Image (cartoon, coloured by chain):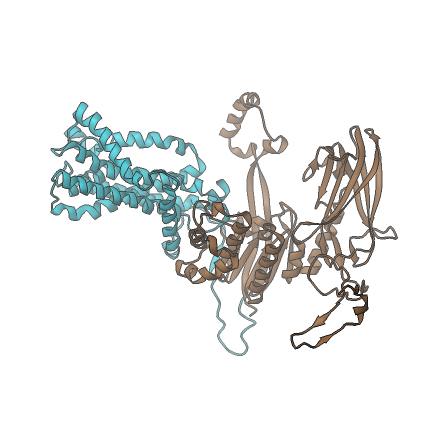
Amino acid sequence: MSEIAIHAAGLAKSYQIARALRKQPYRTLQEEVVALPGNLWKRARGRSNAMETFWALENVSFDVTEGEVVGIIGRNGAGKSTLLKILSRITQPTHGRAEIFGRVGALLEVGTGFHPELTGRENIFLSGAILGMRKAEIARQFDAIVDFAEVEQFIDTPIKRYSSGMYTRLAFAVAAHLEPEILLVDEVLAVGDASFQKKCLGKMEDVAGEGRTVFFVSHNTQAVRQLCSRGILLEHGRIVADGPTDSTLGIYNQRLREMRVDAETGVNNPENRRGSGAVRFTAVSVEDVSGAERYSFDMGDTVRFRLSIAINTTMRGLAVVVALRSGMSRELVTSARHVITSDTVLPGTASTVVIELPDIYIRPGEYPLYLHASEATQSPTNYDVLDDLTPPLVVAAGSRRLHDNFDAAQPYGLFSLPSRMMLAETSEGISRVPDLVDALPASE
Amino acid sequence: MTAPATAASPGRQPVSIRRPTVVVEPVHGWSALNLRELWTYRDLLFILAGRDVKLRYKQTGLGVAWVILQPLVAALIFTVMFGRFARLPSDGHPYVIFVFSGIVAWSYFASVLQRAGNSLITDSRLISKVYFPRLAMPLASTFSAMIDLFVALGVLGVMMVVYRVVPTWRLVALPFFITLTALTATGVSLWLSALNVRYRDFAHAMPFILQVWMFASPVAYATTIVPEKWRLIYGMNPAVAFIEGIRWSVLGSSSITPAIVALTTAVSLLVFVGGAFFFRRVERGFADAV
């Protein structure tokens, strides 16, 4: 069982990118014409002048043994997808070598090869063949695929008539029925609705449970935590951590914390930031009731968000929204909007606000933060959005008993609201009235 | 490197050193065609070809009728323009059937070039998201266009009945000339499709290339129009042999010579093999370039 499945040694990948593109996104035709003779000269002398080398991946080495489920984590541009593309032979490395023992199935996108004009049936065969299945193999799995996708009635309808949910289900279903010894998966869970994502995750767990090797790339740290026994953290194309998932995720969150928004990035770094910039968060921290900064809490703890805001133009009031997303489905779990002031706010104003979420009842997991600053009007236009730019809030079960029927190990749902059993009956006619029956209203 | 299989071998059992299924490493220069891998992906090849056929006439009013109409209308125009007005020689056959046999061969050739030439661009998402032998994409066009060729040959058969042209024993050579056409078309399209990934200019130049090439080939006229001393040079154009060859085997006579067939077969093989190796050489950069 402990045979090597993937052996990677010194993998590196470089791209040539145009230097000009980095400084300025575009040039006018006039500038092009003026620069033309110089560029031609440069080009004639070799392209090195106009191009620069960008290393997407540098010296990446690891061994994966059969049956291991490895999560690759890292921020955008860390090289995760490049690594998958190299291992799946889509692109070749600039340096280094990887040896792969076993049949590889790569799932870099949901619906690869799907054609909108073709029917569900035709697309199953097309997509299956593209993913490397033999025709007979697809035919054998056909019913299972249709079943998993829940599209029986529409199987002979062109998929351009499908809802996006049906499309995604069918696409994933084909991929899920690949039977490779080594499965490479990239971010596929980022699509589809929450219930479907759960289904996909369940399927992935099955695959992992069957002893196949899985290489799972995701932003979804909670999914990684749930699926993977080992985590590899990539940063700027290099491996910075490789070990048990918990410790790698711990390092990842630590690093996110270090790069949290401060005056520097908040004002000057518009990357990954939405909003007009009329108002900017300048610092964000999460604290407990004692004022100590932390990102992991137990269920039932009280969480405080300390937000500093700088105003750059005249605004009609100032309001903030603090929201938590689900680490799994990215849906908003809860949100709170608070108006700091309804009066006109002048440029140069700085504001600090602390928002408290008392006794959090949400289930253990990771909750990315969504922060929003705007005018106090009903349809605000001037705003700043920090979506998933700070470390997520990590909620652990803790030891608190939040209500009578509390069971932190129950992994279902987002919240743990109190519940009581009011009646218990079985078909034998033996009914047992629970202790709490007197709490029932005497209406019947 | 860690030795893979040492832990599982207590005692004196022979340690099996497993060979990797796949080795990923930078490759430079020429590489083998790896036809074995292409063979394992043969289902994909035919499913891709089938997709092309299905998609071609989806959402058209006339549907599959276009397969028949396209060469027929072209033959009609040619007959009026070149047969009636310009009175181009047709080797003694009725001009319409003469030109139709040329169009059947040429339009197969041209549509393989068109489809295959753009195949890597239109399916660029596939190239950047999945691995499979890239050769499957242009090769699928070779097969998908063949459906149109067979339908057009059927129409030619009907025309022969109408014009009372009786096929001769030469008909047995038809599969050979169809294979030669496919070989030539595939060879050229391997070059075109690979070059088109890096230089999209080829997509723009394609209509002109095809037009000039067609008039340089004996589609609308018989080779006899070319002066004797230029015939061999004219024969360097591989389209000469397969057009005249198909005409010869179907209609029973044409101005083709064994020398030209031999020359073309050699040229086509060279283009095909060269194209396949060239394609393999540049395909490594496809995912980064499309």
Q: Residue furthest bottom?
A: B11
Left or right: A231 with respect to B11? right
Left or right: B144 with respect to B230? right
Residue A135, quarter of the rendered image = bottom left
**Residue at point 44%, 44% (across, down):** A117
Q: Looking at the figure, which quarter contains the C terminus of chain A? A: bottom right
Q: Quick one: which chain is cyan?
A: B
**Residue at point 61%, 56% (across, down):** A195
- Above-or-below relation of B113 to A407: above
Residue B157: percent from left, percent from top: 18, 43
Left or right: A124 with respect to A247? left
Rendered shade, chain A: brown
Residue A381, quarter of the rendered image = top right
Residue A178 in view (yes/no): no
- Above-or-below relation of B187 to A4: above
Q: Looking at the figure, which quarter contains the N terminus of chain A? A: bottom right
